[in-house]
Amino acid sequence: MSERRGLGPAMTWSFVVLMLALAIACTWLGTWQMQRLGEKEALIAAVDARLDADPVPAPPAESWPTLDLGALNFQPVSLTGAFRYNQTVTVFTSLVNARGPASGPGYWVVTPFVLADGGTVFVNRGFIPQEFQEAAVTDGEGDESQVTITGLLRPGEAAGFMTPEPNMSDRIEWVRDPVRLAAMVDPALAPIAPFYVDLPAVPAGELPQGGETVVEFPNNHLGYAYTWFGFAIVAVVMLGFWLARQRAARSG
C-alpha cells in the first residue's frame, strides 16, 4: 500500500518564502506603476496648461547652460530676430497623422534664427515632401529682416547608436539635435540654443507645413499596475492551493 507524503519542512518553507517574495515584489511593482501613473498625469496636465498659455519670451542665451528643458517642453515662446535662410538644414522624417495636406516621407525644414539679443535658435519651419528637399537647402533667398515669431519650445532629440551620420553635402540630418545641427551651419552663429522651436500651422497648401508638433505621451501605467497586482494575487492563490494540497497529502 503506497503512502502519500508532502514535501519535507525545508522544501515547504523554501516554496512558501519564494511565493511570498514573488507576491511582495509584484505588489511593489504595481504600486510603483501607480506612482508613475500619477507623475505622468501631472506631466500631461502641466503640458496642457502650457499649450493654452500665452507665449513668453524665449530664454536668453545667458540662461541656456542651466535650462530645465523638461519644464519648458511645449512652452509657447516668442522670439525676435532674423532667419538665416542660406543656412537651412533638412531633417528626414516620415509624417503620419498630418494635420495639413502633405504627409509621408519628407523633411523638416530647420533654419537658424539669430536673436536680436544674441545667440541662435534653430526653428523648425515645418514639413516638406521629399521631392522639395533640394530646393529647401539651395534656395537661400528670403526676407532676413528682423521679425518676431512664436512657436513651441522643444528639447533637442537624442541620436541613437543606429542614427546615421549627417549628410553634410546635401545638408540632411536625421534628428532635430541642436548640437548636430550646429555642425552643419556657419560657426559664427554660435552660441546655439540647446532647444529648437516648432512654428505653428500655415494656410493650407503652403510649404513648409507648420503646426505638425506631436503632443503625445504614452500612458500605459494603469494597465501595467493591474498586471503586477494580478500576478501578486495569482502567487498568493497558488500558494494557498499548494499548502492545502500539502496538508491533505500529510493527513491522507
Image (cartoon, helix red, strand yellow):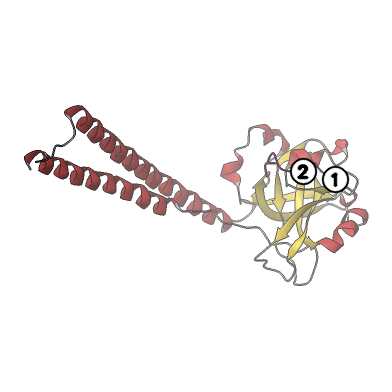
Q: Amino acid at mark 2?
A: Pro
Q: CA distance from mark 2 to mark 1?
A: 9 Å
Q: Amino acid at mark 1?
A: Asn
Badge 2 crowding class, 10 Å Cα cut-off, few under 14, some 14 to 19, many 20 or more, is: few
* Region in magenta: 157-166
Q: Nearer the viewer, residue 132 or 163?
A: 163
Instruction: Kindly identify which residue carries mark 2.
Output: 164
Q: Nearer the viewer, residue 226 or 44?
A: 226
Secondary structure state at the residue bearing disc 2: loop
Outermost residue to the top: 10
Magenta span main SS: loop
> Does the residue at mark 2 contact the one at mark 1 (Cβ under 8 Å)?
yes
Q: Quadrant of the C terminus?
A: top left
Give the percent coordinates (x, y) of residue 136.
87, 57
Q: Is residue 248 above or below residue 108?
A: above
Secondary structure state at the residue bearing disc 1: loop
Total marks shown come to 2
**Which residue corresponds to the image point at 75% horizontal and 68% vertical from the top-left?**
102
Instruction: Kindly identify which residue carries mark 1.
Output: 167
**Which residue corresponds to the image point at 75% horizontal and 70% vertical from the top-left?**
203
Give the percent coordinates (x, y) of residue 15.
25, 34
Give the percent coordinates (x, y) of residue 68.
59, 38
Q: Nearer the viewer, residue 122 or 169?
A: 169
Q: Quadrant of the N terminus?
A: top left
Side (left or right) of 144 relative to 155: right
Q: Nearer the viewer, residue 18 or 229?
A: 18
